[in-house]
Amino acid sequence: MTLLPDLVAERDGDMMLVGGIEMFEEPVGFRPQPPAAQIVDFVRPNGDAMKIRLVGGHPLWGHVLYPAAIAMSKYLEEHANSLLRPNLIDDSSCGKYVLELGAGAGLPGLTSVLEGAELVVSTDFPDAELIDNLKQNANLNLPAHLRERLVVEGFTWGTNPACLLDHLPITANDEKCGSLSQSPDSVPAGPVSSRFDLILMSDLVFNHSQQEPLLRTCESCLRQSANPSSPSPSLLVFFSHHRPRFVKEDNRFIELAKARGWRCKKVVENPDAGLAFPEDDGDQTIRGTVHGWILTR
C-alpha cells in the first residue's frame, strides 16, 4: 500500500500515520446499517397471542417468519392429541419428546410446548445470534412453569447428535442409536438416551446439499416404532417452493426419504399460505403454497 507523504511522519526510524487508525473509520451513514431485530405479533388458531422475535437480516434466513412454520404450528395445534400429548392408550403419563431442526424463530417448537410436549429441543446452526434469538423467544412466550420444557442447542445437520440426545431420559432397554451409518460422527457405544417421538423440519428442504445430512440426523434421532405396521414416531416436513425453477430439487427430499425406507404421506397443501419473500421473482401461486408431509418408519 502506498501512503501519501502528507499523511505519514517518521518516529525513531519507523513510519507512522499522522491521523492514527481513526482516519480509516467509515463516516456515519457511509453504508446502511444492518436491519435491527423486530418483534412480530402472532395469533394462534386458539386465539392466544404470541410475540415472535426475528433477528435482523441474516445470511441463514433467520430473519423471516415463514408461512411453512405458521402452517406447521397450526397443524401441531390441530393434531396435538396424537403428536404431542400423553398417549393414554400406551399408558404414557408424559407428553412427547420433540426435536426441532433449523428452528429459525422457533414457532413450531414453542407451539409444541404450549400444546403438551414433555420436552422440545430446539436447534439451529450454531450461530450466536440465532441461538440467542431462540432463547429470547422462549422467554417471551413460555410461562415460567413451562420454560424448562424447551432447551436450545446449536447443531450442524449430519454430525454426532449426542448433544441432542443427552437432553432425553436414559432408558436401559432402548436401542443404541447410531444410524449415521459408519460415520466417525455416529453416536458412541454404551448407554444412550431414548430417541425423539417427533422431529420438526420447517422450510429446510430448499437447502439441497443438506437433504441427505438432514435425513441421517432424523434417522439417528427418531425413536423406532414399537409397532411397524402402525408407526407413530413421526417426522413433519413442511415447506414452500421459494424458487419455482427448483421444484424438482426441493421434492427430491421426499424421494430420498422413500428410497431410505420412510413412509411419506402428504397432509397439507395450502395455496393461500402467503409469500416468505414477496420481492422475489417467480410464480406467486407456486411460491405461496405450503406443502406438509408426515414421514414415519
Image: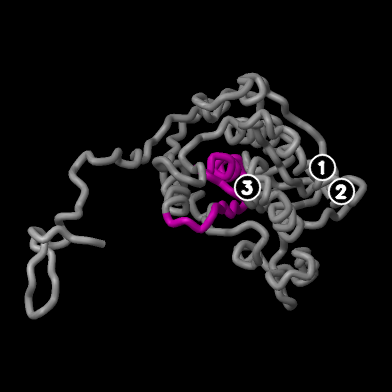
Q: How is the image coloured?
A: one colour
Residue 45 in percent (x, y) is at: 57, 26
Residue 248 rendering spot, x and y as whole percentages = 75, 35
Q: Which residue is mark 2?
A: 259
Q: Tag count in the figure?
A: 3
In the picture of the structure, the residue carrying the numbered disc 1 is 255
Between disc 1 and disc 3, the foreground one is: 1
Corner quadrant of residue 80: top right
The reply to whether residue 19 is in sight is no
The span picked out in magenta is 100-128
Asked if marks 1 and 3 touch (Cβ < 8 Å), the reply is no
Side (left or right) of 213 relative to 28: right
Q: Is residue 135 magenta?
A: no
With respect to residue 6, does 211 lie above or below?
Answer: above
Seen at 74% across and 69% down, the residue is 183
Of callouts 2 and 3, which one flags the residue occurring earlier in the amino acid sequence? 3
Q: Which mark is residue 216?
A: none
- Name the residue beneath numbered marker 3: 117
124 relative to 233 in the view: left or right = left
Rendered position, 113 above or below 193: above
| Residue 99 in view in this figure | yes
